Amino acid sequence: MSSESDSKMITVDATEAVAMVAHKTNEVIAIYPITPSTPMGEFSDQWSAQKKPNIWGTVPLVMELQSEGGASGTVHGSLQTGALTTTFTCSQGLLLMIPNMYKIAGELTSTVFHVSARSLAAQGLSIYGDHQDVMAVRQTGWAMLASNSVQEAHDFALISQAATLESRVPFVHFFDGFRTSHEINKILPLSDDQIRQFVPADLVAAHRRRGFSSERPFIRGTAQNPDTYFQGRESSNLFYMAIPGIVQKWMDTFAGLTGRQYRLYDYFGAPDADRVVVLMGSAVETAEETAKALNAKGEKVGVLAVRMFRPFDATLFVNAIPASVKRVAVLDRTKEPGSAGEPLYQDVVTAISELGRSFEIVTAGRYGLSSKEFTPAMAKAVFDDLKSPSPKRHFTVGINDDLTHLSLSYDPSFNVEDAKSVRCLFFGVGSDGTVGANKNSIKIIGEETDNHAQGYFFYDSKKSGGLTVSHLRFGPNPIRAPYLIEHASFVACHAESFLEKVEMLKYAAPGAVFLLNTTWNKDQIWAKLPREVQEQIIGKSLKFYVIDAYQVAKDTGMGNRTNTVMQTCFFAISGVLPADEAIAQIKKAIKKTYGKRGEAVVQQNFLAVDKSVENLFQVSCPGHVTADHSRPNPVPASAPEFIQNVIGPMIAFRGDDLAVSAVPVDGTFPSGTTKYEKRNFALEIPDWDPSICIQCNKCAFVCPHAVIRPKLSTPENLAAAPEGFKHVPAKFFKEYPGTEYVLQVSPEDCTGCGICIEACPARDKTNSSRRAINLVPVQSVLDRDKANWDYFLKLPEVDRTTVVPNNVKNSQLLQPLFEFSGACAGCGETPYVKLLTQMFGDRAHIANATGCSSIYGGNLPTTPYTTNAQGRGPAWSNSLFEDNAEFGLGFRLALDQKEGYAKELLKKFSDVLGDELVTAILEADQKTEKGLAEQRLRVELVKSKLATDTSPGARDLVELAETLVKRSVWILGGDGWAYDIGYGGLDHVLSTGRNVNVLVLDTEVYSNTGGQASKSTPIGAVAKFAATGKGFPKKDLGLIAQAYGYVYVARIAMGANDAQTVRAFQEAEAYDGPSLIIAYSHCIAHGFALERGLEQQKLAVQSGHWPLYRYNPELVVAGNNGFQLDSKEPSIELEKYVYNETRYKMLLAQDKPRAEMLLGQAKAGIASRWTQLQYLAAQNKDAN
Amino acid sequence: MADLSTSYLGLKLANPLVASASPISKRIDNVKKLEAAGIGAVVVYSLFEEQINHEQQERDHFLTKATNMHPEALDYFPDLGHYNLEPDQYLAHLSAVKKAVGIPVIGSLNGVTRGGWTEWAHRIEQAGVDALELNLYSIPVNTSATGAGVEAQAVDLVGDVVSKVKIPVAVKLSPYYSSLPNMVRRFGEAGAKAVVLFNRFLQPDLDPENLAVVSTARLSDSGDLAFPLRWTAILHGKVSPEIALSGGVHTGRDLLKSLLAGAQVGQIASEILVNGTDRVREVLRDLGDWMDENEYLSVDQLRGSMSQRKVVDSAAFERAQYMRALVSLDDRFI
């Protein structure tokens, strides 16, 4: 038996801990990325790419599929062919595997699926953790083991592997998504020798023999009839009955090897407890630690952890409850609306009933959905409620249910933190490297000292300028605290703007250290602090330190990454380690982390370490509050009530405090809420110089965030403009004589990405570095531009009916109805989405596939799709990842059906409405904005004429008349959806001939889940699951769709040809049939400076990688060839495009011969495709 | 047949024609062709200080830039551990070149500041090369930097690099020093065994259509020879480092002039980039033919025989020659 002292402990999260075992004990791994299980597949792929062998000495084969459905089918096939096979998934992904799970279980096939349990998409999607997904597969015939911590996840990955091989029943091994999957903790890893003992050769051989072979054929997978199907289902009973014994046997064997003893139903607490809480997952540790604290105060309580949920062994379970227990509470981390109780509760009640045990009461509680916190205070509330005279039979805990009054109240000050632990909170900006540095600190302390360490990281939902909160615990004892820190001994704020937004010091314990990164020095800072911050510092006697990490980082060549500086300060003043030792350890860690990236990177970080301490100062705080301002409200006072009361607290990270009644019942939220969330995180923003400007509107066209906008205004409307409001005669808009041209930036919404500057074609004649817009420090123009922006918004929009949006310049006179999204600064997708809303937004219905575009498009607290002055705007929804095309088709069918019915009714009521009106509506030309506006007027006339008619038909027509105005159905998604998981549906929807418009935002990689290869990934590009560079060319989705002949297809890249982009949108929408636009979207996952995104797009086209074309079936109908090639013959070498990007360059660095080989193939592919395109384009001439 | 063999940096060379650092040495088969054509030695293309530092920093920047920003995408690229950085590939290339040919192989390091990157001199040595050429490429743009300061930095850098290796070091330098002879002497005192006259700066050009600065690489021609030839003649015999003449050597006659002025070797690049490696054979044949016709027995006999110290009209290399050139112009145009 080994002990902790003679083995090297490691600090890892559960995804890595689980993958370590799975990769060692399997031969085939088929996966599909889904948060938060993705890293398990990525680790496996990475290790296989590095040729790390499994315990048999061979490297497992890892393959990414097109969906979880596909992954489970491949797993099924591999298992049936006798290979040890696994996968990792969760949430909707697990649901997509259900059909195969029935098959795999029905065929008694040994495998383990490792599931980082996650919420399901219901009233809204959530990537966070609970047990809804695993509870949705409890009926499939799989055994289910729950692990409760990082160490347990590592251990149970192996125990379940042994148990499945012996029992033949497949296992779901699950652990809490994020809370366990992404918690870093110190664990004792299993050695290969230990692992080997859990995959006995005879069981492996038996598994292989059960697989198919044409050498000894049999048939499995038959269709069965009523005569035997039922018996067949019952014939496997004995296998299920054997499982508890088998699992416990392996748990005992495991204990013998490692000293870690587990039981199927593990009881912790007082042997003579009167109250017991039953639960599974990470909350077990919280409940245990709470029980310990309560028992120490004389109470008698216990916790019964359910480790094996399926099969549920009633006898073992009931016998695990001490005889003294009178009251039981069962906690489920899931929700089954309408059920008699959640699954664990129902099983417990059934078991108790069958075994004849009686208790005074068995209560049922729900907790922790979507990673809602479950703290010791909440656990105590459950124990407390059990001892009340009348416990709640059904309850919730962790929320305030003011609607059905099910929730238990709790005392948040209750605290069971280990007094010997150091608890640290870090509030960082997404891009400043705080989380990475903290992960490093955990490694330093966890692996280089005897201390235990734990790290958990919170991220807000923004992809740029977002907040990260790192929760780190260190101490001499094992850390069993799977909940966020609320009593911190160290709080660091890495960006001073957060002081105005987040109540971070409420988490500081009295006497804690508070470290602030600020540009103000130690003598200036006090006066700058909001009142609430000063009160906390004084009230809690905090030790307050400041550093200007921005300056230190800049001086040491670290750019805007302040991580190393702040990490050094943390070690210098937190007292976790002696300062000298800590500095030495930081440098050692830097060497380890960055060494592989080169000595220059190491030296740069060393310099930053050395310069940090000398720039760290303690602030001498006065004994009283002197602040002249309070923390501002998160939304303006003028915002609507719902925004004030619900969205505001969510923006301020106080959403947990919202009561149940405050939250919409069906997931419906108002549109256009990003405008209330002023994020103010750009350091530099564009400033307009009207004297240079040529009024081309290209800056507005490319702006990913809709923060730079033009308007044409009458001089009268500008009379009351604030001082410094810029405008010039609109001399480039001859069709609007006498108007003034205004170009205004929203300073509080701009991300400072700089892409507009790159797009500006106008230069100062006397200084070639100056353009018509130039980046300036935000503080130099903030006050002026805030006032100007407010005034700008009040200026009337240009009348849509006067705009012919057939070019870039005119398109930007239309109001964007997609603004201020949380996309990455410089995003390549959002300019297309914005353009869509400008051209068609006031009548658009948008179906959005899950992915980046659904996250920046629909992730709370605020969302970017907005409305115009008439209250119209895009109707937006997200169904799932895989079904988006079908979802959008549903929009179309409903609209068509309603429109058809409305037209029938129009004719029916023609005597009331008048033939002239009816005919005008039925024959309306709605191809122009003028035509649309006229139709809207006619519709209003219909409504008014029928206003008093109470007949059913009239009421229906009034209701449905709006559908007589042409609607524009758009189906949006990324290449992961269109090329992979949603391709089958997309293909079918295009084939229907219905009038839908598909916009594929093609980043050539799964961007949202972190850069996994899709079928759009180009040959030679490195991506996850294509770590050695993708070996095959990207799928040509455009030409495949074009083959139908009746699908409009356009391949566009706005950076290369913005006019073609506008034309493509116009033509696609005008075409009365299916349209497909494939838009080149530069992406942070390409690894280059995004402000150069437009230039990269141009190079992509010039090199032939991304030829531009349009195929318009209307031209074919007219007797012409519809294919139009919009780009010129490749004119630059492919290297000039690809080697600007890390995704290609890193292959050069890893494997130059392969990079060169793939580059050669890519060039050959470009040449042959160009020939093909030229051929298609040449048909034009013949036809004409 | 005249004896073309000579030495350079203490290395034995079959002849005094050396391929200077250029892209031609990026391919091993090109170096083999040069050897087959009879080249005396080859200087492999340069490893730049910027490559060592900036490439690492750039990759690190883009690999870590977007990490740990969003719960669904904690990073965007697979981490395969070690990256073969361009400098690593350069070292591997040097080793491969050295293995592939029998002629002396000289590594080349191009930089200007003292710092961690000079460690690469040692690594280049370990790659097995016979000597190192240090290319000092400096454009001092800081108005507060003095000439003396810039010079001291260069000398310190040479000393720093020399101290890191046991193989001989040549310094390829710019002509833009206030006192070139003094600088060459100081480089010699700092340990340089040879100086290469001169490096050729890539000159930026302007693109009026796009209002952009573009880089251009202009190749030399024989007309460029006069400038280094003059300085070779002036310095020969006055300073301890050997002199390699670089820039303008295109023909056997150019190489001959270089040797007459006092160069230990002549370096060639543009000619073979444009007209191929076979030109090496022709240049050497022309040199040999001239020597045979004029009954010179060896290049050692030839070398420096027309340096400033050994010509009748030594002032010709100074201002007086300038006066004469102007007069000759007058003769032509008047």
Image (cartoon, coloured by chain):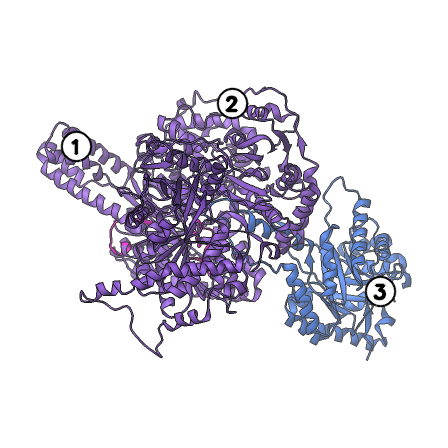
Q: Are marks 1 and 3 on the same chain?
A: no
**Residue at the image point whose x is 78% and y is 58% from the top:** B164
Find out whether the residues at labels 1 and 2 contact each other: C-beta distance under 8 Å.
no
State the CA–CA distance, disc 2 to disc 3. Answer: 80 Å
Question: Which amino acid type corresponds to the residue marked 1 in the rendered image?
Answer: Val
Q: Residue B124: percent from the left, percent from the top?
A: 72, 62
**Residue at the image point whose x is 45% and y is 33% from the top:** A653
Density class for disc 1 (Cα within 10 Å; few <14, some 14-19, many ≥20) is: many
| Observer able to see residue A982 | no
Q: Secondary structure at mark 2?
A: loop
Q: Which residue is mark 2?
A: A630
Judge by depth and name the residue closer to the eye, A167 or A579: A167
Q: Is residue A214 above or below residue A1158?
A: below
Q: Which residue is mark 3?
A: B262
Judge by depth and name the residue closer to the eye, A190 or B248: A190
| Observer able to see residue A993 | yes
